[in-house]
Structures are given as structure tokens and as C-alpha cells.
Amino acid sequence: MKNMKKILCVILSLAMLAGTLSACVSQYVSKETTPAPTQAPPATQPPATGGDATQGETPAPTEEVSIAGTTLDVWYAVSGTSGELFTAQSEKFAKEFDVKLNLSYTGGSGDTATKVAAAQLNDTAPDVALMYAGPLYTGGKDNYDIDALIKTGSGFDINDVFEGMMDYCVYMGQGYCAVPYGISTQVLYYNKDLLKNAGVDMTNPPKTWDEFKTLLKDLKGKVGGNMVFDTSDQAWLFKSMLMQNGCEIIDNKDGEITPIFNNAQAVAVADFWHSLVTDGLMAAGEHGNAESTFLSGNLAFIAASSNRISRWNGTTTFELGAIEMPYFTQPSLALGGNVLVILTRDEAKVRAAWKYLCYLTNVENNTAFALGTGYLPIHKSALEMDSVKKAIEENEMYGVAFKQLDYTWAYTHFEQMGTMDTEIRSMLNKLEKNRGTSEELLTSAVNALQKEIDADK
Amino acid sequence: MQNEVEKPKKKGTVRLFRKEYRTNEVLVGILFILPTVAFLIFTFIMPVIDVIELSFTNFSMSAGTMKNIGLENYRYLLELKEFSNLAEFWDALQENDFWASMGRTALYSLLKLTLDTGLALFFAVMLDKNVPLKRFLRSTFFAPVVVPMVASSLIWMWFYDPNVGPLNQILAFLGLPQSKWLYHESTALLSILLFSLWKGVGYNIILFLSGLQNISDSYVEAAKLDGASEWQLFWKIKFPLLRPITSFVIMMGIINSFKVFAEFNVMTPDGGPLGSTKLIVSYIYEQAFTRGRMGRASAASLLLFMVIFVLTQIQSMVNAKKTIDVE
Amino acid sequence: MKGKKIKNTTNLDRHYVAFAFLMICAVIMLFPFVWMILSSFKTTMDVYQYPPRWIPSVWNGDNYAKVFEMIPFLRYYWNSILTTVVMTALQIGISILAAYSLVHLRWPGQAVMAAIMRSSMFVPMVVTMIPMYLLVSSLGLVDTYAGIILPQITTAFTTFLLMSYFASIPQDMIDAAKLDGCGPFRIMTRVVIPNTKGAIATASMFSFLGNWKSYTWPLIITNDKMYRTLPIGLRYLQQESSMEYQVMMAAAVMTILPVLIVFVFFEKQLVRSITLTGMKS
């Protein structure tokens, strides 16, 4: 009884306090749809997050207006060599145009996304961000300034940019709301020493997954116990494979997203994936450990991001090689990595930010960044540049990564894309551990995703 | 301040809520608790009111939308598919991610609580004896507590690495079968448990040790004169006297093991093999940040709040009863 | 003291059994530290050698230098010390007042207060983090020490810990002080605090360690690297150096060494002072 009283007291006092204190989150979130349950006095509310106010009348940058003296807050999610090159280029821009840049490394993709999302809720987001899934924070908030700026045709030559890259800058299939920078695809790395010792010839690398699997089986017979293939990002690879087999993953009809990765083509891909495990070529559910297994020389092939080209170069205990990713019916690779977004809605800042983005993504700077990091150049003309040709000559792995540019592709950003990746990872985990047939597991993943999409309608 | 306190008449009393209080004690008591109240409002009550409010909405941080959806979040979390017998009920529980995570959390907490408290008490009793190198030993057991989580979990992930890790190497050397550690559903949770025992046991050792050293020698001597064995001495004298500390340790153990997150997030970021290490806070984190369902995450954390509340209530009731028994 | 002597003579050999057992456990406890120190001198080649290599092929200190190159380590260290010390001092100060008020004074609503305080420990940080962030950033405290410190002043744990020690102060002592004409404030400063110094030291230590490893909140509330603390530095280092375990290990060694030294140095006083808190009478 005494305890019951205590509990009651706690609940009562909480309720009392709830009544007297105005809650803080609700103040910051746009409430067009329905008012929040306990209403804070409307007078004290700052304006809602998304700037519906400026939508449509995007500032057109005119050459005459100087951007000197502007200050831009920039958050970026690339570290190591990439971070250094990015800041170096940014600082050069700042000097050249007399702009002040406050650059902050805000952690990896997850950390940065959380911070940006939180900061957007009360208008403290940075002016520019280099981040993963950027379109969610611009297009997702009806900010298509970049689309209008690209259309002005000044400073950013969209015709010279790979189409797949621009597809990576779209939200719900609408206009552009980001600019590609720090983009990557997966590359198939291999341990040259291991293959040489096993007597496997790589002069004619396998082109299709079937050819590759034959090679893996052959290799497995020669090296014995070890697993021979893995990937450090299974969802990414799986999505590429779906596309290679003609499954477009999601269907976007007038802004209505429907996941379709349980059709016949998808089932075939999942079956193939499963066979890699049952044939003892890929370990079940050890993707998190794939990189360290590969680096310790216990894995022959690994599908990993192209940015490892520069990171691993010269630090591995064995000679490192790379070949183009195999395919099913058509070569195709899902893009990953970062984009640049302009988050500010202040006209003068947008103007300066656009200058900054154009500077970073011009052919010269972007290509230098790509060569220094293993991220991909975004321009078609980059492949004709002498520096690129020279780099390919010196390190064949660059050649492999750049050759893949011809068939890269991206699906549109949508609110539940994080959920989709989670569902795909958990589906693959179950598949590898024989917790159901390909069809069952794919269908249940699709249904789970569909349920989440419907919940937002 | 001192003057203020001493000025009121010594005999001054007030009647509040049908009870008599000394006026100056009430004044000073409330004055002293004020800083706590201020910070509680700031760090607990205000955020929790928000969380309560959010739990009735579909608040998504990335989309910035917020719509009142009533009890939908709670329904989503608690709803089970239909079942007609116990086996089906069990299946239904496991199919609902929230219940499954809660179940795993309960299992983990039970293991952690028993092993952690048991080991800490055991080591504390050992360290309380007159052993050589006492200082060194005490520091050793405590040392893991000071290592930051990022660093210590990285070391252990390295240990657990099925290929380049030393643990499998040692197992192979001893002719024992090797393990996949964090990469197999049957061992992942236990691997993290082992790590967290290493990391946390020193904490409770210090608490128990301080309690043991507070036990008056006269009790021990009296028991010895009665011819009590070491074993009896512990169970009849020391253990009952340690009850306040034990109770504190268990209460904190329940709270902390139900709220455990960091090591699980670092060592198995995706919820581990077949979700075997997805505990409740990992579930909440996934909902909030991977899936962008802040509202649902808020509802789940309020349910977690209630679970911990009930458990600590039960614990304090049991403890109160036990204390009376002893007396 | 006499009791200990009796123990010594009667159970001499048994204690050596205990000692041997403890030593074995100590070796296991220390193994990760040995591994950490050894690894901090390895090269990438050593790290990924198979089968695992225990002793570095060459002892090089490059990894230590690299830590300083990659992150402003000393600045992070300073930030960590500053925020941790301030947080600990505030927490302990507030907790002493609260524990004294709850244990030795009588006023209405104490039970409710204690229940609310206990409840404050039940909510996981991952959900309160965002509301807190919005509140703190609307106060303009992003990238300030105040923004890091104030929201982390949670006192429930230390208050409960202190309460259990305060409660064990004999009532006669307090009554005697009252007869001498001491008011509540003086009883606290003259009787309670001097008699529970050890407990306060223990509480401070726990509070310090809790704050020292604090990670989630400083991560979200700082954007400027000048305000970041060590745990975040370590995380960023990990992201930055990716698979270079050895650099992380070097950073970890430098992070924990000072804390360990301080602990080893104060440990004796700490445990002893708890014994001397006058609770034996």
C-alpha cells in the first residue's frame, strides 16, 4: 500500500509539472498537420524549421554581387586523408574569395546525420554540410535551391557530370537538392600474393558472378579451409546485385515509394547469395569482420568502398589488387558516399555557399580530391585529364574504380531508406543462417518496409 | 546563512500534512534540496515531459514532422500476433522486436546481475583478507573501470577477432575448439557479457570492500570465539551486515543493466548475429536514429522506465522484508 | 587491529591460497592492458600478421606521435579534465546537501523526493538527448563548457550512495551536537562531513569516473573541436585511422595512464579513509 502511494505521488507530481512547464520539443517542430497534445503558448514559438517562406523564389546568383566577407559554417563527415584534402581545398577557397569558413568535422555519417537533424529542429544547422543522405535534409524539407542554382547554368556544368551521380542528389524523384562530392562505389579488392601462391591466374578477371563463383570454387579447392570472399557492406553489395539482375529495388510512382525487391529477379540474387555461403565461399554473418580478415591475409577477395584505394595503399602485408565488380545480366553499381548540401536559407549565404560548392566540384579540384582519396571524380571530362591517366598508370586500382563510373546508378532518396538498409541487412543475416527461403525472407523484409512507409502516409 | 538557520526559536514547530515538523529543519531541508530539484527539473523532468508528449506523436527528427497519433506507438510496440496456445504465444513474443529485445535484456540483466554481484562480493571478501600485495591487487581489479569504453571495447573486439585475435590463438594452443565470439548468435551476448564483467566488476568490489572494512572487529572476534568457521562467519555475520551495500549494488545493477547500450552499440552495431545482441536500448536507438521513429522510441523508453520502476520497487520490498527477518 | 592479528596467525596458509587465486585472476584482468601496451608499439604489418603476433617486431613510438598529429590530444585532455572536475565538484556539493537534507532533517515530501530522484536514473540517455539538445541549444550553449557540464549534473547516484553512509552516523553524535547548540547547518559541516570524508571521497571517485567516460552528450553538444573531450577524440581517432588499431591503442594508453596513476596513488587513502569514518563506534 505504501508503495502504491509512492507511485501515485510520483505520477501526480510529474503530471503537475507537465502542466506547468511548457515542453520544448514541440516548439521547434512544424505543426501544420495537427497541433501537439499539450499546447505551448503560440506567441513564444520561433518559426518552424523548414523555410516554406523562401520556397520557389530561389535567389539567382548574379556575378556582380560579391560574396566577400560572408561567413559559412561547414560540417563535414569525411576523415583521414579525405578530411585533410577537403579542408585544404576549402581553405584555399576561403582565401581566394575572402570568405570565412568555420569547418567542423562532425564524426562519421551517422553522427553527422544525427547532429544535422537535431540542429535543423531549431535552426542551428550549419550553412553547408558534406554528409551522407544529404537530400533528406534539403529536399526532404522542400529546399530545392540547388536545383534552381544548377539551372542558372553558372559554375556547375551538369552535362559533364555522370547521370548516376546526379541521381544520387534527388529526393523522392524530384529536383536536385545536393551536389555529388566524395562519392564511391564498391570495388572488388584481392590479395595478389594469396592468388599467386594458389596458382590462380588473374590476367583475365572474371566478368560475371557465375564466372567469379567458378574462380572462387577453384581457389577454395587450392587454399583449403579459408573463406575466399566477403564484403564489408552487405546491404550495399546486395542492392548493386539486385540492379544487375534487373530489379530496381524501389518503385517511385508520383512520390509514392513501393519496395519491389521480392520479385523473381531479386529471389534469384538472394539464391545466389545463399549459395556463396552454402558452398563455403563466404562466411555467414561475418561482414563486420571482413576487413580485418582481409587485411590479415585470410581472405582472397573483398568487395569494399573505393575509398580504401588510398587508405590501404602501401600498408597491407601483401600486394593489393582490384578488379571491376562482377555482374549478372548487366554491369551496374549502386553509388554510396557523401553529397554536399546547402542548408542555409539566407540569400547571401546561399550565394556564397553555391560559389563554394562550385569551387569544390569544379573539374580540377574534384579530380584532385578523387585522386587523393579513392573517391570518384564526378566529371566525365575528368577521365581525359593527364593527371587521371597518370594516376591510373601508377596505380591500376584507380583505373578499375574509374572504369566502373560508366555504369553507376542511384535510387532516389526517401525518408525510410535507413529502414530499408536495416531490413536488408537483417534479411541477409537470416538468409545466410538458413532461417528461411529467399522468397520468404525477401517478402517479409519488403512487407516490413512497406508497413513503415504506409505509417507515414 | 548560518544566522538565518539559528535565529528561529528552538521550540518552533509547524504542522504540515497532519504531521509535526521542526520549522528550522523544514526550512533548511528544503533549502538544501533546492539545487537538486533545480537540476532534476532541468535534466530529468523537462526532457521526460517532452518524451511523454512525443510518445503520442509520429515525431521524426530527419523529416521534422510531428502529428498526434494517439496510442499508435504503444500499440505498435506491444501488439502481438494472434495466438491460441502457449507455444504460439512464445512465437508471437519473439516475432515482436520490442518484446524480443525486452526478453534479451531481462536475460542479460539476470546474468550480469548475478555474476557481477557474486564475483564482486567474492573478490571483495578475498581482498579483505590479509593477503600480500593488497594494494596492487585492488588497483588491478579496479583498473578496467577507468578505461574509456571506445578504447576498451576496441581491445576486446580485437581479442574476439576470429582470425587475428589472441583468444582463438590461445584456444587453439590449448587444443580447444575455436569460437566465432561476436559473430555467432550463440556466443555474441555472452562475449559482451564477459567483457562487461571485466570492465565493471571492480566498481562493485570497491563498494563491497568499503562495506566489509566497516564491519566492526568485535563482531568477528565474538563469532570466532564461538568457534564459527570462515564460511559461517561470512554467511552469519558479514553478509547480513553488508545488506545495505548489497541492496544498493543490486538496485544500481538493475538500473544499469536494463539501460546498457554503449558496449553493445560499439561491439555489435547492427544488433549482432540474428539480432541476438539487440537489447532494449539498442532497439530504442535503432528506432530513433536508424529508422527515424523518435515518437516510437519515446514510447518504448517510457515502457522501459516502467519496467525498471517495477523491478526496483520489488527489489526494495524484498529488501525491506529481508531486513526485518534478520533483525 | 587486534582482530586482524588473530586472523593472521590462525589462517596463514589459507590466505596464501586466496593470494594465489587472486594473482591468477589479476593476470587475467591485466591481460588486456598488456595487450594494449604491446600493441601500441606495433606496425600495421604486425597488427595484421597471422597467426597473431604478441611482441612488436620493432619497438617504435610512431603511433604515439601520430595521435598528436591526428587530433589535438592535449586540448581534448584539458577539456576532459576541466569538465570532469567541475561536474564532479558540483555533483558532490549538491549531493552532500541533498543527502544530509534527506537523512538528517525531517520535512514533508521526502519520500516523494527520493522516489523522483531514483526515477531519474531510469530513463536512457538516447531519448532524452534530443529534447535536452533543443533546450540547451536554444539557451545558446552549444560549443560551451556550460553546455557540456550543466545537462550532465545528475546527482541521484551520488546522493543515494552518500545517504547510505550518512545514515550510519550514530544518532548520539548528532544529538550531542544539538545539545551543544548546533543548528542543522553546523551539524552538517562539523559532524556529518568530517565523519564521512571517506565516503565522500568514494562518491567523488565514482562520480569522477562516470563523468570521465561520458560520451554521448559531449558528442552531440560540441561541433567545435576546441570543446571536444577525450572519449570523442578517441572515437574520431578510430573513425579516422579506421583499421589502424595500433594508433588507437597508443591513444588509449595515454588516456588511461594518468588516471590509473592517480588512482593507484590515492587508492590506499581512499579505502582506508572509509574505514576511519567513525562508524565503528
Image (cartoon, coloured by chain):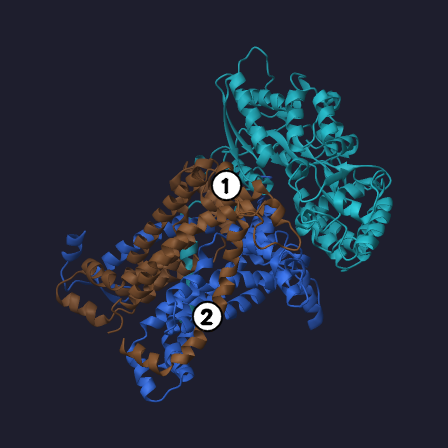
Chain colours: A cyan, B blue, C brown
Answer left or right for A88 relative to C165.
right
**Front-most of residues C78 and C223:** C78
The residue depicted at 42 percent of the width and 79 percent of the height is C14
Above or below for B304 versus C258: below
Look at mark 1 in the image and give the residue it sits on: C67
The residue depicted at 33 percent of the width and 89 percent of the height is B226
Q: Quadrant of residue B95?
A: bottom right
Q: Quadrant of residue B28?
A: bottom left
Answer left or right for B322 relative to A136.
left
Do circles 2 and 1 both sit on a common chain? yes
Q: Chain of mark 2?
A: C
Proximity of marks 2 and 1: CB atoms separated by less than 8 Å = no
Q: Position of residue A36 (x, y in %)?
A: 53, 44
At label 2, the amino acid type is: Leu
Q: Is residue B283 visible?
A: no
Q: Position of residue B32 (x, y in %)?
A: 27, 55
Answer left or right for A357 relative to C104.
right
Q: Position of residue A233 (x, y in %)?
A: 70, 45
Look at mark 2 in the image and give the residue it sits on: C22
Please identify the quadrant where the C terminus of chain B is shown. bottom left
The residue depicted at 67 percent of the width and 25 percent of the height is A367
Answer few, some or many: residues within 10 Å of disc 2's Cα (few below 14, many 20 plus, some between 14 and 19).
Answer: many
